[in-house]
Amino acid sequence: MIIGVLKEPKGEKRVSLLPEHIVALRKQQVNVMIEKGAGDNAYALDAQYETAGASVGSRNVVLESADIILSIHSLTENDITDCKCKILFGFYQPLFNAVYIKVLAEKNFTIFSIDMLPRTTRAQSMDVLSSQANIAGYKAVLLAANLYPKYFPMFMTAAGSIPPAKILILGAGVAGLQAIATAKRLGAVVEVFDTRPAVKEEVMSLGAKFVEVEGAADAAKAGGYAVEQSAEFMARQKARIAESVAKSDIIITTAAIPGKKAPVLITEEMIAGMKNGSVIIDLAASTGGNTAHTKNDETVVVNGVSIIGNSALAADMPSDASKLYGKNIFNFLQLIIDKSGAINLNFEDDLVKGTCVAHGGIITNERVEAALNS
């Protein structure tokens, strides 16, 4: 059996597998083919892949030879035409790309989208969303520190005192918690808002203040995401967030709802009330963003406030991001590869079934089907 790893499109520095993952797969009698230059941006050279036991070739050769194709991003039309295998594996965001998934399904591809992995205890070692969000939260704070025209920590000098930066973090999931920890290490004062009261203890254990708004809908079964809230709660939430926004120097937003547009938590009026030189890092930009002015992959300046829309910050730390992503992928592959190194798709396994979005010529995931028909 051959696993093929493709080079990602321009702007994406990560790669699906590093040489260290190849060594482990080779022990399982699995062959790996790497597209030439696929790991260059993650500081993994072709020679390192070959030393680990992989073969390196052109994109066409990989597409024509592999039994499973790994790619973080979607394949192009030419890739689909050239691809001889029928199993695709990547980070395809099928709830937002349902039409693309339907096209592949009709061409009889079996598609595993790792971002659809059920977020259970058993799946933690395969949870790409968490591993990449952790990096994004860390990088968001460092990016804000570079853009913010003042210090993060408090300084007391002979020339006067510098107050610490005030940071507001919206969403205390994996990205938010890492952002809290990083901001506190840099000496900032941190406030955190989340609709889930259960995360209050975690937030406070990291040294941040938890902003509470009563009456939130239960998000216990939302897999770590936000859920849609009532109109009454949204009104209270807006008022409470507005208070925190007005005194914040930096805001990091992370709120996302699976398959839906990200909720707008920072309105135009709130941004107008922020101090000149303030910074907003919006990690939900790819699904619309948490501010009224967010544009994905762009920096927008409104009334002196810089709003950076970036949902792919993990790609800015490509070596470790690829290391973690590849380990997640390797762990999942153990569910669909038997002891002899052959493919064994066991759809009785809830993780295999949940991650598979198309098989046998049809879309197999109910949520993706619903997104297609919405």
Image: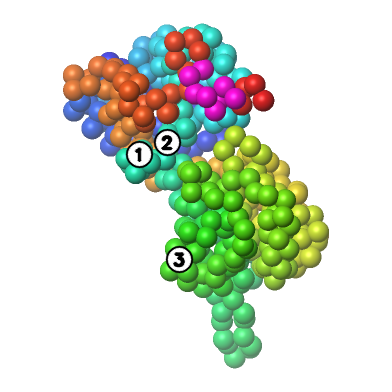
Splitting the image into 4 quarters, where does residue 120 fall?
Answer: top left
Q: Residues within 10 Å of mark 3 (few under 14, many from 20)?
A: few
Q: What span is in magenta?
A: 363-370
Which residue bears the numbered disc 1? 123
Question: What colour scheme governs how the chains and residues are painted in the rendered image of this protein?
Answer: rainbow
Please report contact status of discs 2 and 1: CB closer than 8 Å, yes or no.
yes
Q: Could you tell me residue 175's position as x and y percent?
A: 50, 52
Splitting the image into 4 quarters, where does residue 274 fall?
Answer: bottom right
Splitting the image into 4 quarters, where does residue 60 fall?
Answer: top left
First reached walking from the N terminus: tag 2 or tag 1: 2
First reached walking from the N terminus: tag 3 or tag 2: 2
Quadrant including the C terminus: top right
Which residue bears the numbered disc 3? 201
First reached walking from the N terminus: tag 3 or tag 1: 1
Question: Is 137 included in the stretch rendered in magenta?
Answer: no
Question: Is 367 included in the stretch rendered in magenta?
Answer: yes
Give whichever of 24, 198 is nearer the camera: 198
Secondary-structure class at tag 1: helix
Quadrant including the N terminus: top left
- Residue 205 lies left or right of residue 275; in this view the side is left
What separation in Å lies between label 2 and label 1 (alpha carbons)? 7 Å
What separation in Å lies between label 3 and label 2 (alpha carbons)? 25 Å
* Res. 143 in view: no
> What kind of residue is marked 3?
Glu
Q: Which residue is drawn at 67% across and 46% down?
A: 263
* Res. 159 in view: yes
